[in-house]
Image: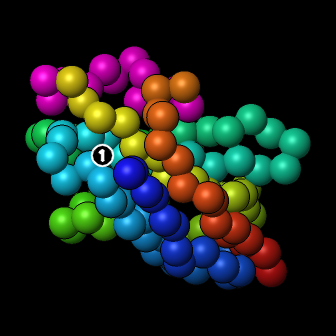
Amino acid sequence: QVQLVESGGGSVQPGDSLQLSCAVSGLEKYYFQVAWFRQAPGKEREGVSCFSTSDGSRWYVDSVKGRSTIARDKNMVYLQMNNLRPEDTAVYYCAANILRAGVIDPASIFSASTYPYWGQGIQVTVSS
């Protein structure tokens, strides 16, 4: 059974840093991609960052490039976010997809429909 559990959210001030964690279980035998998505009130779910366990490739949406780093350590996937802005306020989700033959489709990495496995989501609030 695949399970993803997020942790590390909270309320911070603009300019602060935060590290989100995603504990992944049930995918140990596979290459997989893990992505962080976020959804702000009244907005569509947005892909933020993606990591491929087959080759360590990383992708970021433009709005977080230079401020965020995605990393993996065994069964944990982390999203380090620096210089947080009020517009980063959202519920953050981690999601996973098994890679067939270890190949990732770059065109689909930020499409929510690519991912069959999702965490429950965690709130991040950036406010002064």
Q: Is residue 31 visible?
A: yes
Question: Which quarter of the figure has residue 52?
Answer: top left
**Within 10 Å of the Cα at label 1, are there few (<14), some (14-19), or many (20+) other Cα atoms?**
many
Residue furthest to the front in view is 1
Residue ranking furthest to the right: 42
Residue 65 percent location from the top left of the image: 44, 49
* Residue 82 in view, yes or no: no
- First to last magenta residue range: 101-112
Helix or strand or loop: what does disc 1 sit on?
strand
Q: Is residue 17 above or below residue 96?
A: below
Location of residue 125 in the rendering, given as x and y in whole percent from the top left corner: 73, 71
Residue depicted at 39% across the width and 51% down the height:
2
- Coloring basis for residues: rainbow
Amino acid type of the residue that numbered disc 1 sits on in the rendered structure: Phe
- Residue located at (42% from left, 64% from top): 22
| Depicted 24 relative to depicted 53: above or below | below
- Tell me: residue 102, above or below residue 19: above
Residue 66 magenta-drawn? no
Query: In the image, residue 122 lies at what x, y percent?
Result: 64, 66
Q: Which residue is mark 1?
A: 51
Taking the spot 33% from the left edge, 23% from the top edge, the residue there is 106
**Closest to the observer, 86 or 24:** 24
Horizontally, is 80 left or right of 74 in the view? right
Left or right: 110, with 127 as reference point: left
State which quarter of the image contains the C terminus. Answer: bottom right
Residue 60, position as x, y percentages in the image: 41, 43
Residue drawn at point x = 47 percent, y = 43 percent: 117
